[in-house]
């Protein structure tokens, strides 16, 4: 039986750079995804450069209009900043002025209020008044006098009498109806809003003062409400 021998023949790979006596060359093979990302970034940069070039050309072509828009923008910003600063200053010095109507009964019960009366006045009887006098001494006129232990008299209607009033009248049952308009004048600087408005003014000043030299600030702040 014949023996079969299979010989493997290796084909050497000759590096031309190495055969020429130089160092071997090494090449890094990039994955397709990285290559796609590199090309995409390159294309995006090219598009951005084209857009910037077009915008630059448009601005150079219409530089008069661009300068006008920039000037109007500066004037707009300056007017708004000046008005904002003016509004804050006026808020700090503002005063609330109004009228509050009051309509409420005021009871004097339990207040301990008395009205003292000490006066002699004249009254007229509106009806007959019977009197019982003990130890009476009556002058009948013409020197005639009548003394008696008990005398029953009736004072007719219309009789004038002098009465001395001396008393304290309590006002516990009195209810006073109060209806009036109360004027109110409250400076905001003296309320709890005062410190907050001062803080707001300081913040606005810190924002406006650095920009004021760069903008055409108006001498008189505008008023948007007019």
Image (cartoon, rainbow, N blue to C red):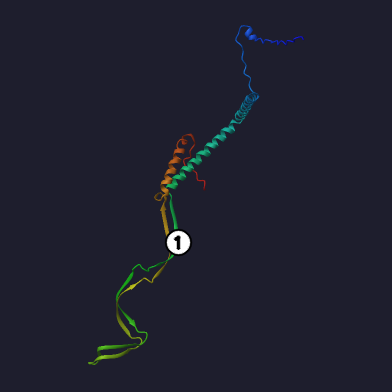
Q: Position of residue 32 (x, y in %)?
A: 65, 24
Whole-percent x and y of residue 9? 70, 10
Residue topped by disc 1: 101
Vertical placement of 156 versus 64: above or below? below
Query: On the rendered structure, is 138 left or right of 217?
Result: left
> Which secondary structure, mark 1?
strand
Left or right of 113: which side holds 64? Answer: right
Furthest residue toward right: 1
Relative to residue 217, is residue 3 depicted above or below? above
Q: Position of residue 77 (x, y in %)?
A: 52, 39
Q: Nearer the viewer, residue 23 or 212?
A: 23
Query: Residue at image x 44%, y 40%?
Result: 205
- 60 vs 27, nearest the viewer: 27
Image spot of residue 134 (x, y percent)? 26, 88
Q: Is residue 113 left or right of residue 146?
A: right
Q: Is residue 223 above or below residue 4?
A: below
Query: Which residue is at a point 54% across and 35% down the rendered structure image?
Result: 71
Q: Find residue 168 and report its image quarter.
A: bottom left
**Looking at the rendering, in which quadrant would you find the N terminus?**
top right
Q: How many tags in the picture?
A: 1
Q: Residue furthest left?
A: 143
At 45% from the left edge and 61% from the top edge, which residue is drawn? 101
Could you classify mark 1 by the number of other residues whose Cα lies within 10 Å: few (under 14), some (14-19), or many (20 or more)?
Answer: few
Quarter of the view holding residue 3: top right
């Amino acid at each position: 039986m014949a023996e079969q021998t299979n010989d493997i023949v290796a084909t050497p790979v000759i590096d031309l750079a190495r055969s020429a006596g130089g160092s071997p060359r090494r090449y890094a093979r990039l994955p397709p995804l990285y290559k796609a990302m590199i090309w995409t970034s390159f294309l995006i940069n090219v598009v951005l450069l084209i857009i910037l070039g077009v915008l630059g050309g448009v601005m150079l072509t219409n530089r008069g209009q661009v300068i006008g828009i920039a000037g109007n923008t500066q004037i707009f910003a300056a007017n708004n900043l000046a008005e904002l600063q003016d509004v804050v200053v006026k808020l700090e010095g503002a005063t609330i002025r109004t009228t509050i109507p009051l309509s409420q009964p005021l009871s004097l019960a339990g207040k301990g209020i008395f009205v003292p009366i000490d006066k002699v006045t004249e009254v007229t009887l509106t009806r007959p008044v019977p009197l019982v006098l003990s130890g009476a001494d009556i002058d009948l006129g013409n020197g005639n006098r009548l003394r008696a232990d008990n005398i029953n008299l009736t004072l007719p209607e219309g009789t004038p009498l002098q009465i001395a009033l001396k008393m304290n009248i309590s006002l516990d049952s009195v209810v006073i109806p109060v209806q009036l308009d109360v004027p109110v004048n409250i400076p905001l600087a003296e309320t709890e809003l005062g410190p907050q408005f001062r803080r707001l003014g300081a913040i606005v000043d810190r924002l406006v003062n650095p920009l004021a030299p760069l903008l055409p600030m108006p001498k008189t702040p505008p008023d948007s409400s007019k």
